[in-house]
Image: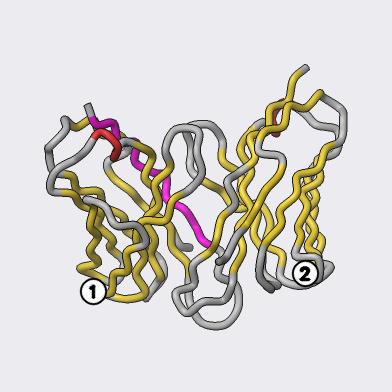
Amino acid sequence: ELKVEQNPLFLSMQEEKNYTIYCNYSTTSDRLYWYRQDPGKSLESLFVLLSNGAVKQEGRLMASLDTKARLSTLHITAAVHDLSATYFCAVDYGGSNYKLTFGKGTLLTVNP
Amino acid sequence: SQTIHQWPATLVQPVGSPLSLECTVEGTSNPNLYWYRQAAGRGLQLLFYSVGIGQISSEVPQNLSASRPQDRQFILSSKKLLLSDSGFYLCAWNTGGPGIHEQYFGPGTRLTVT
């Protein structure tokens, strides 16, 4: 069974501190995607990671992929309030239907 | 550029009434199309997907159905809504073949069944 596990599922952060969200997946893949969802809104794409060792950064967010460990991390540097959202990782297992398998999401709240 | 539309944006329907949600994609041809449901505070549940006109696959048996009458149109329907059908319905698309299969999401339809 294809599984994608995110942890933590809930993360209460203090401003200006650093945090990491983990995304573990069950079967070999070298394509992983991170999405952000603001409350009441749809999902928007954050990062596309396509190979072992891939690292992408935008602003205070940095995502990386270790295909051997089947692990992706989303690192938040110096959290600010506007990063409060739910973050999903999704794994492309390469099926002919081109589906993605999503994690349950991490609800991230930044407190002053 | 590609865009994806969903309507209506919000809907309040009584239990037992029918449902029709529409999703259309512009700027691409032969997209793969997906319907997801998200209950309040929960993750995404894949309901249906389609890799071509008239080709529908169901992920979860329930009282919903989907159709794809045109290449870039995906419709989610129900003959009789249940309270448990309430949620945020998201349509998404991607392209097939080798390479990136990143999904792009529409703005969503928020359905409340009363």
Badge 1: how crowded within 10 Å, few (<14), some, or many (20+)?
A: some
Q: How is the image coloured?
A: secondary structure
Range drawn in magenta: B103-113
Q: Is residue A91 left or right of residue B10?
A: right
Mark 2: secondary structure:
loop
Mark 1: secondary structure:
loop
Marked residue chain, label 1: B
Q: Which mark is residue B54?
A: 1
Which one is closest to the eye, mark 2 or mark 1?
2
Give the farthest residue toward the bottom: B98
Give the farthest residue toward the front: A1
**Within the image, what quadrant is residue A110 found in?**
top right
Q: Is residue A89 left or right of residue B2?
A: right
**Within the image, what quadrant is residue A76 found in?**
top right
Give the farthest residue toward the top: A112
Q: Is residue B90 left or right of residue A80?
A: left
Badge 2: how crowded within 10 Å, few (<14), some, or many (20+)?
A: many
* Quadrant where the image shows the N terminus of chain A: bottom right
Q: Which mark is residue A67?
A: 2
Distance from the alpha carbon under mark 2 to that under mark 1: 36 Å
Q: Amino acid at mark 2?
A: Thr
- Residue B66: x and y, percent? 25, 60
Residue A25 or residue A86, whichever sits in front:
A25
- Residue B19: x and y, percent? 18, 45
Residue A22 or residue A49, whichever sits in front:
A22
* Prevailing SS of the magenta stretch: strand
- Residue A108: x and y, percent? 68, 33
Residue at x-position 60% and y-position 51%: A103
Q: Which mark is residue A57?
A: none
Residue A65 or residue A25, whichever sits in front:
A25
